[in-house]
Amino acid sequence: MDIESLRLFSSLARELHFGRASTECQVSPSKFTRVIQRLEEQVGHQLFERDNRSVRLTPAGEIFIQFARETLLRWEDLSDQLHEETQTLCGHISIFATVTASLNFLPHILGQFRKKYPAIHLQLETGYTLDARKYLDEGFDVVVAALPSEESSDQEQRIIRSIRMITIAPKAECEVSRILDEPQIDWQSVPLILPTSGGTRTAIENWLHRENINPNIYSEVDGNEAAISLIALGCGVGFVPQLVFERSPLQPEVSIVRNGPPLEDIHIGFCTRKRKLKNSQLVQALWSTIG
């Protein structure tokens, strides 16, 4: 049992899909399968239930993932301490960033960081998620995403930008635009495209409850880009960050709804474990670059 095997196991436990996990870890599916089978032999229990359609953790797998994550965290702490013995900072930092953050904020900050610390290698993964902080539990050093105003007790945040949330609708003539053109919008009839979870979803649900609106939910999506695509197609009304709207190639096909629900700004920033920031000179170096 080695660190690399635990990393592969942790990736599969997160993705629950051999193809995606093997692509993420850059190993062949056959090697990935052999590693998992070897782990199961060493542990003496089946760790995953798998068939042609799905992969899921067994009860033994649920226990083993806690061991794997704790071991990987302890290994990272040891690596950080060993790096401190060298004069030149070197090593690697793993970063998970949402697509919005990676396109709009990371290039400048990471560009400055690379100039100052060329020996530190960056491992960057992007994706669509409404709670990116969970990736800290999966072994990432830093997450860059929309963050809640209140920090958790074991995490450190650095907000770099606040973005206004807006309500948007299809611009083309369709059933949705006809409903919105009425002098008094019947929000109960408006098909809504909602985020699956997160602060914006909570704010919308609170508004619906206050206004006594029984929502007509057309779809629930994870990514802002997916929401804009559905809205441009005339499927419904949605809620996205203004920055994403302004930079979307579909902007000409959607319009802002001025009397939508009141939504708080979202706050884009960096997040890491407090323990990691305290013990890792690499993460401290990145934190100092953020400003």
Image (spheres, helix red, strand yellow):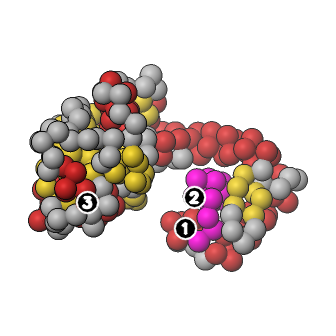
Q: Amino acid at mark 2?
A: Glu
Q: Nearer the viewer, mark 2 or mark 3?
A: 3
Which residues are drawn in magenta? 3-19
Whole-percent x, y for residue 288 in the image: 23, 38
Residue 260 sits above or below residue 119 on the image: above
Label 2 secondary element:
helix
Could you tell me how far apart the alpha carbons at marks 2 and 3 are, in whole angstroms? 38 Å
Mark 1 or mark 3, earlier in chain: 1
Q: Earlier in the sequence, mark 2 or mark 1?
A: 2
Image quadrant where residue 204 sits: top left
Under mark 1, the amino acid is: Arg
Identify which residue, 163 or 35, lies in the foreground: 163
Q: Main secondary structure of the magenta part?
A: helix
Return the residue at label 1.
Answer: 20
Mark 3 nearby-residue class (10 Å; few <14, some 14–19, many ≥20): some
Q: Within the magenta stretch, is there residue 7? A: yes
Which residue carries the number 2 mark?
15
Tell whether label 1 touches label 2 (CB within 8 Å).
Answer: yes
Rounded to the nearest angstrom, the CA distance separating label 2 from label 1 is 7 Å
Q: Is residue 110 magenta?
A: no
* Quadrant holding the C terminus: top left
